Amino acid sequence: MKVVTMCDIGNQRTVNQDYVSYYQKENEAIVVLCDGMGGHKAGEVASLLTGEYIIKQYKEAKPFTQKEYVQEWLHQVILDVNRLLNKKSQEDFDLHGMGTTLVVALLVGDVLFVSHVGDSRAYLVSQRQLNQLTRDDTLVNALVDAGSITAEEAIHHPKKNMLVQAVGVSDLVNESYIEIEMHDEDILICSDGLYNSLTNQQIIDILGEDIELKDKGNRLVKEAKIYGGRDNIGLALISRKGAGE
């Protein structure tokens, strides 16, 4: 198992509000990616607090031996960090209204567990295909679900980037939960700074190159800054190739 993380401020931002980190154990690994929001440096604080809290809790957790426990742990840690951000926001006026997207990917043996809130994404990369595992918590997706607009209308909707939930902005958070068995696939986790800058085909072409995982990450960041780069760019790549070596 190999894990690579990258986080770049991009071309236009003055503060990097993305956070991405990982931690590996003997037969497990966790990746946490956050894209903060809020004025001043509140978004940066929200993403940092969330990411560091979850990594800390994972380091202290016992090895996961049951799938049910994984789902319970993910739910509880997201609930707890949501409360933490709400508390910090109430205590410090400069942090009022802060929040963050969140993707937590936990690989235990051959099984991948993913929970997310917001519009940062997790993709399954297999046979030169990019399959989005998460579904953005956006207003346009809610409108599509309600039948108010079509999927085609959602693509160019003026409020397509408006989130309907994020960690820390309300008392309640409803995270997703995904569980899949892994084989030789890779995983890409990223903030919107990457997928809004590059097309799926551009991402697939880079990930399909016969180069090291770290070089793929560097290429993704470099190309994202060439073709967009208007936002921070956070990403993580997880490869199971050679996992048994």
Image (spheres, rainbow, N blue to C red):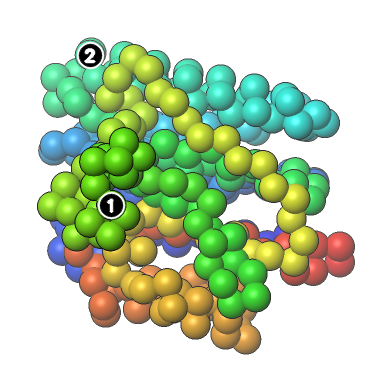
Residue 86 or 160: which is nearer the viewer?
Answer: 160
At x 31% / y 55%, what residue is drawn?
151
Q: Secondary structure at mark 2?
A: helix
At x 42% / y 72%, what residue is drawn?
200
Q: Secondary structure at mark 1?
A: loop
**Which of the marked residues, 2 or 1, is nearer the chain's N terminus?**
2
Q: Position of residue 43 (x, y in %)?
A: 25, 38
Residue 175 or 155: which is nearer the viewer?
Answer: 155
Badge count: 2
- Residue 96 seen in this snapshot: yes
Quadrant of image for the C terminus: bottom right
Image quadrant where residue 144 sits: top left
- Residue 222 seen in this snapshot: no
> Looking at the image, is 107 positioned above or below residue 93?
below
Quadrant of image for the N terminus: bottom right
Image marks 2 and 1: residues in contact by CB distance under 8 Å? no
**Inter-mark Cα distance, 2 to 1:** 39 Å
> Looking at the image, is 220 positioned above or below residue 117?
below
> Looking at the image, is 213 positioned above or below residue 196?
below
**Disc 1 residue type (three-letter):** Thr
At x 54% / y 76%, what residue is drawn?
207
- Residue 150: image tag: 1
At x 77% / y 61%, what residue is drawn?
183
Neighbourhood count class around disc 2 (C-alpha, 10 Å): few under 14, some 14–19, many 20 upward = few
Q: Position of residue 62 (x, y in %)?
A: 75, 27
